Image (cartoon, helix red, strand yellow):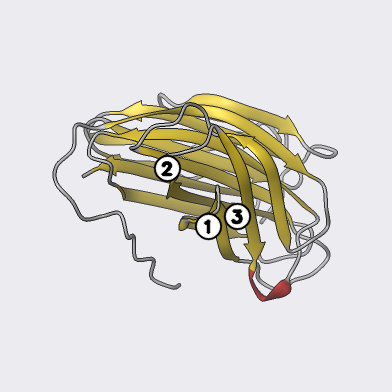
Amino acid sequence: MSMIINPYRFGPAGSGLTGGFVSYYENNANTNTYTYTSANFGTEDPNRFIAIIFQGIRPASTLARSVGSVTIGGISAVVAVQQDSPAAHKPFSAIAYAKVPTGTSGTITVQIADSLALLYADVAVYRVISGSGIIGVADTLAEVNGASDQAVLGSITTVDSGFVIAGSMQANGGTATIAGSLTEDVENDTSSAEYFNAYSAEVNAGAIDVTITTSNSGIGAGDMVGVAASFRDF
C-alpha cells in the first residue's frame, strides 16, 4: 500500500470543522476518466474544502483498480482512502478532498490508474469549512466484505469539532444502514441492486461506529466495499 502525504496537515490550531452534503452525480460511462461538470460546491469561503466519495463497479476484469488522480474545481486533490474488490464486476470506493475556496460549482475529474476502466461511477460531494484554513485526516477505514459477511467497516477515531464521511458500494446488495450517529445522505440503486450509499456527520473526540450493513443476507464475498475518513482542523 502506498503512503499518502497530506499537504494540509501542518498549521496552527483551528476552531474546528463544519461540514455537510451538497450534491450527488451519476456517470454511466464505461471509461477510465470520470468527469462531473457543473458540480454544486455550495457557498464560497476562503477556508472551504470539497470532499468527495467516488464509487462504482468494475467490469469483467480481475486487474486491480486504483485512483490515479483527482481534481476538484481544477485543483489537485488528496486521495485519503480507497478500496477495490479484486474480482470481476465488483465494487470500488474512494474518498478524496481539496481546498477549493472559490466557485459555487465546478468540474470534478477522477482518473483510474493504468488506463483501466470502471463500468460506471458516481460521486457524492461534501462542503467542509475549516476554522484555520487547514485540514487533515485523523483516521481512515477501508474494507471489502468476506463470504456471507453483510457488513463492512467498524470503529473510526474522531476529534473535537471534526467531520466524518463514509460510503459503501454493493455489486449484489440491498438497502444499507449505518451504525452510530452518521446521517444517510445518498442511497441510490444505481443498476439492478447495485447500491451507492453515502453518510456524514459532524463529530466530537472519541471513536464512533461506522459499520455499514446490507439487508441482503445472500451477499457474496467481495460484493461490498466501504471507505470512511475522519477529518480534523489544524
Q: Front-most of 147 and 29?
A: 29
Q: Front-most of 97 and 116?
A: 97
Q: Position of residue 49 (x, y in %)?
A: 41, 41
Upstream in sequence: badge 1 or badge 2 = 1
Upstream in sequence: badge 3 or badge 2 = 3
Q: Position of residue 222 (x, y in %)?
A: 66, 56
| Residue under the image location 69 percent in, 45 percent down | 36
Q: Is residue 32 left or right of residue 156?
A: right
Foreground mark, 1 or 3, reads 1
Relative height, residue 62 to residue 54 (above, below): below
Q: Position of residue 140 (x, y in %)?
A: 39, 51
Q: Residues within 10 Å of mark 1 (few under 14, many from 20)?
A: many
Going by the numbered disc 2, the residue's amino acid type is Gly
Q: Residues within 10 Å of mark 3 (few under 14, many from 20)?
A: some
C-alpha span from label 1 to label 2: 16 Å
Q: Front-most of 167 and 53?
A: 53
| Residue under the image location 55 percent in, 41 percent down | 167
Return the residue at label 2.
154
Residue 203 in sight = yes
Q: Secondary structure at mark 2?
A: loop
Tell me, yes or no, whether the two marked residues, 3 and 2, touch with CB atoms within 8 Å: no
Q: Secondary structure at mark 3?
A: loop
Return the residue at label 1.
82
Disc number placed over residue 72 in the picture, else none: none
Going by the numbered disc 1, the residue's amino acid type is Gln
